Image (cartoon, rainbow, N blue to C red):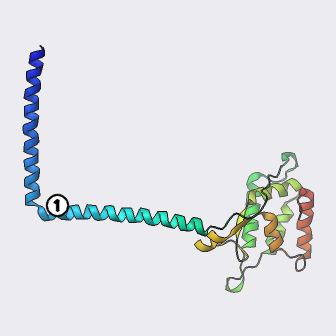
Amino acid sequence: MKKISQKVGKIASKENKEKAKKAVKEAGGFIAKNKKEVAYFAVGLVGFYVVYKLYKGINKASDAVGDILESPEVDTIKTDLQINPKNLTVSAAHAELLAKSLLDAFNKTILFGQPSSDTEKISQVFDEIKTGDDLRLVHKKFGLRKRAMGGTPTTYMAKKLADSYDLTYWLKEEVSSFFDPTLYKKIESRFKMAQIPF
């Protein structure tokens, strides 16, 4: 039985060698007949590889430049505001909507794109904030937002260079105690209820 399997193995390996030789001959003949096409294909393959490597290199370089240009974190103390759900009059989804409304109000522009807060909208938002915990929740949903030139930065470079600030900072910058004393007092009273310094 062993001898038979050895003979079969030798025949099979002979056949495989013959098939391999035939395949190499056919491939060589194909290459010889189609020299130009094969050369173009090889050049195209090498070109694609070079372009791919350049693309990867440029991406790595731009990431490195972005890291260099990124401004250091603002020297702020990150707060974890504790919220008592029993004292809430707004849902989490509604608080998120109020936080977005505030950001939209801060980003209002007037003639020629000059920043100018929509104080009426800010006032409407603070009318919906009834308790200190409501304000804490809205404050938490607002989080830290990038700010530059009186609003949210829109260009790549401005986003990279801008620092992030919390709702307290944005409100202090956007609402003037001199020009909007009524609104300022309304905001201040809600912050007192939330026991957050303003």
Give the vertical position of 61 relative to 113 (above or below).
Answer: above
The answer to whether residue 85 is seen in the rendering is: yes
- Residue positioned 7% across, 22% down in the render: 7
Residue at 8% x, 43% y: name it: 21
Residue 33 location, quadrant: bottom left
Tag 1: amino acid: Val
In this picture, residue 29 sits left or right of residue 72? left
Q: Nearer the viewer, residue 162 or 107?
A: 162
Q: Which residue is mark 1?
A: 38
In the displayed orientation, state which residue is furthest to the bottom. 112
Estimate the x, y position of residue 31 in percent, counting from the top left.
11, 57
Residue 155 visible within the image = no
Q: Position of residue 82 (x, y in %)?
A: 83, 49
Report x, y in % for residue 10: 9, 27
What residue is shown at x 75% (from left), y 72% (from top)? 106
Q: Is residue 33 left or right of residue 158?
A: left
State the residue in front, 45 or 169: 45
Q: Quadrant of the N terminus?
A: top left
Q: Quadrant of the C terminus?
A: bottom right
- Residue 169 position within the rendered picture, expressed as x and y whole percent measured from the top left: 80, 67
Nearest the viewer among 128 and 181 is: 181
- Element type at marker 1? helix
